[in-house]
Amino acid sequence: MLPADKKYEEFAYVLDFIPRGKSLVIKGREGPIVQAIGEQRLTLLELLAVDNQNFEPGEKVRIGKEGREKIVSVLGKLSFEELTPEARSSLSEVVERIVKSNESKYVAYFNELQPLTPRLHGLELIPGIGKTFMKQIVEIREKEPFVSFEDLQERVGLREPAKLIAKRIVEELSGGSRINLFVRK
């Protein structure tokens, strides 16, 4: 869970780099533009890069108030529709990387998610988890909480949990879900 006082991201992961781009957020702003996703809040962001820098999709960059090296400023939030085709195509891979590098945060969801309605459990919103897996996860976690994706995979047989969570996050970012587990609206 996010600390309530943290309003800003410290790090973002690059989705696309447009060396001579026009800002979609600030009219008339031009320059090296980076489309990225924030590490903690999973916000889609537009960043203004330092001139003569290069960026790779998936690269982690510091965007916090201090210690920025390759980023001049955060121009603002982007909607999924505003992402370039390149940014969209690198999104799932980058999100999966974020999920894996914050493993304990995402494993906690498997330990903490509760029923949302009498007929729908939060776990069922994760692709690949139906009633059967959900019941298994709930039973097993009551005995002992999960400690890693590997632990989850071994004890429940759920294959590639990080990939499943990443898939759900992309679904939420693209506006394809009514209920969000991971992305704040």
Image (cartoon, helix red, strand yellow):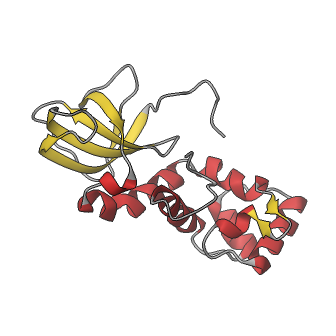
Q: Is residue 140 left or right of residue 57?
A: right
Q: Position of residue 112 (x, y in %)?
A: 77, 53
- Residue at 60% x, 67% y: name it: 161
Q: Position of residue 106 (x, y in %)?
A: 63, 53
The quadrant in which residue 81 appears is bottom left
- Residue at 35% x, 34% y: name it: 76
Q: Is residue 68 left or right of residue 3?
A: left
Which of these two is toward me, 127 or 76?
Answer: 76
Q: Position of residue 127 (x, y in %)?
A: 60, 72
Q: Is residue 175 left or right of residue 19?
A: right
- Residue at 90% x, 61% y: name it: 143
Above or below 36: residue 139: below
Q: Position of residue 129 (x, y in %)?
A: 68, 74
Give the residue at the far bottom of this rendering.
132
Which of these two is toward me, 117 or 98?
Answer: 117
Q: Is residue 50 left or right of residue 179?
A: left
- Residue at 56% x, 68% y: name it: 164
The quadrant in which residue 32 appears is top left
Which of these two is toward me, 177 or 19?
Answer: 177
Please give the count of numbered marks on the rendered protein.
0
Above or below 26: residue 67: above
- Give the position of the N terminus as an image quadrant: top right
Which of these two is toward me, 137 or 15?
Answer: 15
Give the residue at the far front of this rendering.
27
Give the residue at the far top of this rendering.
66
